[in-house]
Image: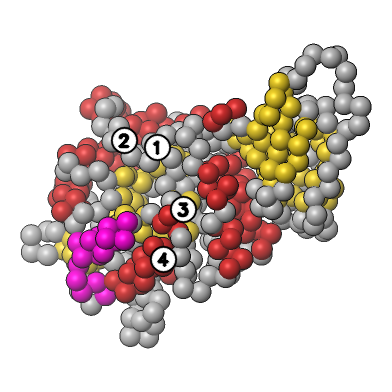
Amino acid sequence: MLLKTVLLLTLVAQVLVLENGLLRTPPMGWLAWERFRCNIDCDEDPKNCISERLFMEMADLMAQDGWRDLGYVYLNIDDCWIGERDDRGRLVPDSKRFPHGITFLADYAHSLGLKLGIYADMGNLTCMGFPGTTLDKVELDAQTFAEWKVDMLKLDGCFSTREERVEGYPKMSAALNATGRSIAFSCSWPAYEGGLPPEVNYTLLANICNLWRNYDDIQDSWRSVLFILDWFVKHQDILQPVAGPGHWNDPDMLLIGNFGLSYEQARAQMALWTVLAAPLFMSTDLRTISPQNVNILQNPLMIKINQDPLGIQGRMILKEKSLIQVFKRPLSGDTNVVVFFSRRTDMPFRYHSSLAKLNFSSSRIYEAQDVFSGEIISGLRDDTSFTVVINPSGVVMWYLYPIQKMQKTGQKSQVPLMRIWDV
């Protein structure tokens, strides 16, 4: 009964909390966790420990190497930055690893045209055992982050009860807005409740959070990518309608540039996260990333698709016995993106299809651009046959746009177009 009362009060009080005008497209940036975890040994590993130095070096590269100009603007601190609470109860960063404080780091990021994100936890402790944000500290921590000029808060849920999360996440949303500073709010709440209704109220979430983690943490492996993708596909009828401008499902970080994915798998994760309208948070070492992986992450057409202003999340539309899956996402201007994804592990597969099979209009002629190669295929009608060659664990990604309306001749294509994409 008490829980129902809390939920009702939360719904009534917080319906108008969020519309902060932020993240009208999925956020893009760099996040420390997947690559650098909770490495706090700066004596043994000064270049890679969670420290002021690491974030400043990443900020420099984001500004110098084209990341910022493509939209990767968030420089996000994750767990393990906190030193303690001071005698006033305020969070303070570890004085050895962040000697100049968080305001200094925020100013540095802002001077480079970037935004700074920070991490806290709705519990007694963070996931790695540092001081958490208990209910009595929510307003104090929100004000502290605003004074530090932080631009995004990720609020985790380790070491908290369901009742504390029910009260705490809406409370933090209101507290952030009350500071007067525009701070995007990333919530881990759904991931701690199983990610699905009735335990998760996505209508409420869209009113208090700009993005939310739905499911398990990603690990540096292809198996982990597939595990998360399959969960999103299984529940796409629930998840797809709740995403949109200002409120996004978050399948977690991009692994591209790390150790667990092949080249084909890295391209696949980028394409699949883009079709899901997911946040694009890299978590890799920008000092050592290969040109090949830079090209994947900095693909201008890919980013344009991810950042489409309609903000509609794509979905899987076909699952073939041949282990080919087809995803489709509608975009603004009557355009679409289609991803042909191979779950095969044997050899490149020739997949035969047509636009009619992919639910495209019969009244238009389309042109497709391969998002990775830039190659153009013209004159696609709904009855045009085509073939794509998809490498194992790989994708072919098409950006499709209408080029003219069909004249009603009543005739089908005399010579179906057959296009074989190079392996």
| Disc 2/disc 4 C-alpha distance (Å) | 28 Å
Magenta stretch: helix, strand or loop mostly: helix
Horizontal and vertical percent position of residue 309: 47, 35
Q: Secondary structure at mark 1?
A: loop
Q: Is residue 261 above or below residue 349?
A: below
Q: Check disc 2 and report the residue beneath it.
A: 21
Label 4 close to label 1 by CB (< 8 Å): no
Mark 3 or 1, nearer chain start: 1
- How busy is the neighbourhood of tag 1: few (under 14 within 10 Å), some, or many (20 plus)? some
Q: Check disc 1 and report the residue beneath it.
A: 24
| Disc 4/disc 1 C-alpha distance (Å) | 25 Å
Q: Check disc 4 and report the residue beneath it.
A: 64
Dot 3 amino acid type: Leu
Q: What is the quadrant of residue 340 in the picture? A: top right
Q: Can the viewer see residue 381?
A: yes
Label 2 close to label 1 by CB (< 8 Å): yes
**Frontmost residue, 170 versus 350:** 350
In the rendered image, the quadrant that contains the C terminus is bottom right
Dot 2 amino acid type: Gly
**Frontmost residue, 13 versus 123:** 13
